[in-house]
Image: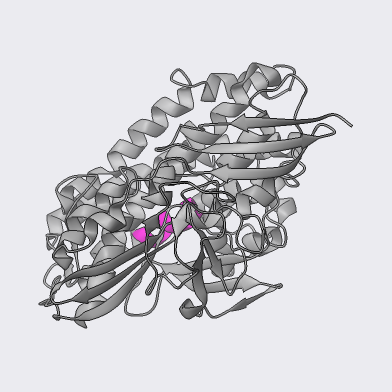
Amino acid sequence: MNRRRLIVGPFNRVEGDLEIRLEISGGRVSAAYANSPLFRGFERILQGKDPRDALTITPRICGICSISQSAAAARALAAAGGTRPAPSGEKVAALLHAVENMADHLTHFHLFFMPDFARPCYSGRVWYDRVRRRFTAIGGTAARRAIEARASLLHIVGLLGGKWPHTLAIQPGGVTRAPTRRDLLRIQTSLRAFRRFLEEALFGAPLEDFAALSGVDALMRWPGGDAGLFVEIAADLDLASAGPGPGRYLSFGAYPGRDGPLFARGVWQDGGLSALDESLIAEDLGHAWMQGETAHPATGATLPDEAMRDPAYSWCKAPRLGGRVMETGAFARQVVDGHPLALALAPAGSVLARVAGRLLELARTQIALEELVAGIEPESRFMEAFGLPKSGQGAGLVEAARGALGHWLRIEDGLIASYQIIAPTTWNFSPRDSADIPGAVEAALVGAPVGDDEDTPVMVQHIVRSFDPCMVCTVH
């Protein structure tokens, strides 16, 4: 049987580096090893700093999900200080965070994922010419319009946060700017314009119709917009069976508020939903270039092994929940939230499921934000007083575009004694653990076809990009 090894990477349409070593047998991947080759050291940089510096430093981990890092840092500081953000401040923070996540989903679909189907290897497919016109890198008509829509949407962040990325608008006690009625009217105008783009270009129908889909058959019959083109491709290439996940999904709960998060917190595994026991999170170091022992992030450390000893092969740790591999991301959020379409796709997961999950979340989040903005009262309080103890600890658990993001902070003598972060791509792109169990993307790649003449297998790229890796967040 023909056997070979292949290193694929860096998959650099998103920030950071990624290399995946493939073992190939009989024209298919028999094993995969995901390497995050860039160590940055933000967790070590934070040690000894004033805890409030986390609000400035952690957003610099990433230029595309910086508000997620801001929100997690603010939540960790609030927990350490025993502060609850002002309710109206929570609403504006949720708005800022959700706008960034929606912009991220749009970018992924139009610029990172769909252009792969414009490759010449697909030139014989009936949909190829339409994809080439719409999604060819740089010149595609869909990309140009999506970038314009994304920029217009992010005006909301500029209005409320002063700038994007790296705004300091989100604080432990709420947000720094109280929107006026005029601000809210401008925000509603921006949201209406974004809805028009989604309905005209992406879905070709009212958002409510896509959000109401309840089964896989209905999804695969979706007739309009770029979403319809995607499901046509998915049916032709059988993306419903490509890249199966662990069938276990984690969400920390997206956009917290007084009545609970907009999208639910919890775990879906073994065919059902259960509450999240955060104490079961642990970072395994069995195949990571790290010193130390497997530990919960509240008590763990980031001590790089500069000797890069075997059997380790990545700077990425291996997060586990109760010792099990979990998948996180927009699709996982929709599964945990109990949406019928997501539940229908949940048992195995796939390339189809992950991309459909982002599309579903785009539609549902847009609808929710319209309601949220309508409920913001400019006369209300948007910030509570905030103070920090000399010693204490707290966790900030939020949902970035790519999934569960956690910050764990410990303060001693008024300074940061420990700051540990688990990012979504750390969950999804982890190496094997001490039991030699592969991470989510490593397992998903097993069985992917690889042609004899392929140095960068196209199906491998579809599977990897369905998880939407952001590697600078992975090892921060």
Q: Nearer the viewer, residue 295 or 267?
A: 295
Pick the residue in front: 402 or 438. 438
Q: Residue at x 49, y 34 (%)?
A: 112
Q: Which segment did they paint magenta?
A: 361-369
The answer to which of 45 and 403 lies nearer the viewer is 45
Q: Is residue 442 above or below residue 10?
A: below
Image position of 240 (left or right of 395):
right
Instruction: Give percent across and percent down for residue 313.
Output: 55, 46
Instruction: Give left or right: position of 446 versus 8.
Output: right
Does residue 130 belong to the magenta stretch?
no
Question: Exactly how many numbered labels are in the figure?
Answer: 0
Residue 38's image quarter? top left
Query: Along the line of sight, which residue is nearer the eye, 148 or 81?
Result: 81
* Residue drawn at the location 13% of the way across and 54% of the way down: 182
Expressed as whole percent of the image width and height from the top left, the position of residue 32 reads: 67, 43
Q: Residue at x 46, y 49 (%)?
A: 315
Residue 107 falls left or right of residue 230: left
Residue sitting at x 44%, y 44%: 470
Q: Position of residue 75 (x, y in %)?
A: 28, 70
Q: Is residue 35 visible?
A: yes
Q: Main secondary structure of the magenta part?
A: helix
* Quadrant for the N terminus in the image: top right
Q: Tell me if I can see residue 377 in this picture.
A: no
Q: Position of residue 242 (x, y in %)?
A: 72, 44
Q: Is residue 364 magenta?
A: yes
In this figure, which colouring scheme has been used for the structure?
one colour
Q: Is residue 408 above or below residue 277?
A: above
**Position of 171 relative to 82 (above/below):** above
